[in-house]
Image: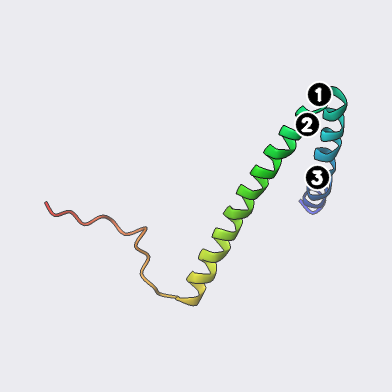
């Protein structure tokens, strides 16, 4: 894992760029759609990471706070 993580972090973006270049050679304008899809996925991943960080920050700011999402529902029945 010491070598694998840095390799993945470096080679994945390089591979995406090389793939877009080859896609442009093959399909021309369709690579614009692929780049748009990659940007949408990137924004989605960014929002997930930011939501996780915000929830961790809120949990650290209020230790011992009641977490309502994990409590069982109370029935009226």
Q: Residue 13 — which label?
A: 3
- The front one of 65 and 15 is 15
Residue 29's place in the image compared with 50, above or below, is: above
**Tag 2 and tag 1, C-beta contact below 8 Å:** yes
Which mark lies nearer to you, 3 or 1?
1
Residue 72's place in the image compared with 20, above or below, is: below
Q: Can you give x and y, in whole percent of width and height, for residue 61 in the image?
A: 50, 76
Q: Quadrant of residue 72?
A: bottom left
**Tag 3 and tag 1, C-beta contact below 8 Å:** no
Residue corresponding to mark 2: 31
Q: Can you give x and y, in whole percent of width and height, for residue 7 in the image?
A: 83, 48
Which mark lies nearer to you, 2 or 3?
2
Residue 26's place in the image compared with 35, above or below, is: above
Instruction: Kindly give the residue lying farthest to the left in the view shown.
Output: 77
Q: Secondary structure at mark 2?
A: helix
Q: Residue 27 — which label?
A: 1
């Amino acid at each position: 894992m010491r070598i694998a993580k840095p390799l993945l972090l470096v080679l994945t973006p390089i591979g995406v760029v090389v793939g877009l270049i080859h896609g442009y050679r093959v399909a021309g304008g369709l690579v614009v759609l692929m780049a748009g899809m990659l940007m949408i996925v990137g924004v989605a991943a960014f929002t997930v990471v930011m939501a996780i960080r915000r929830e961790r920050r809120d949990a650290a700011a209020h230790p011992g706070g009641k977490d309502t999402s994990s409590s069982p529902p109370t029935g009226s029945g």
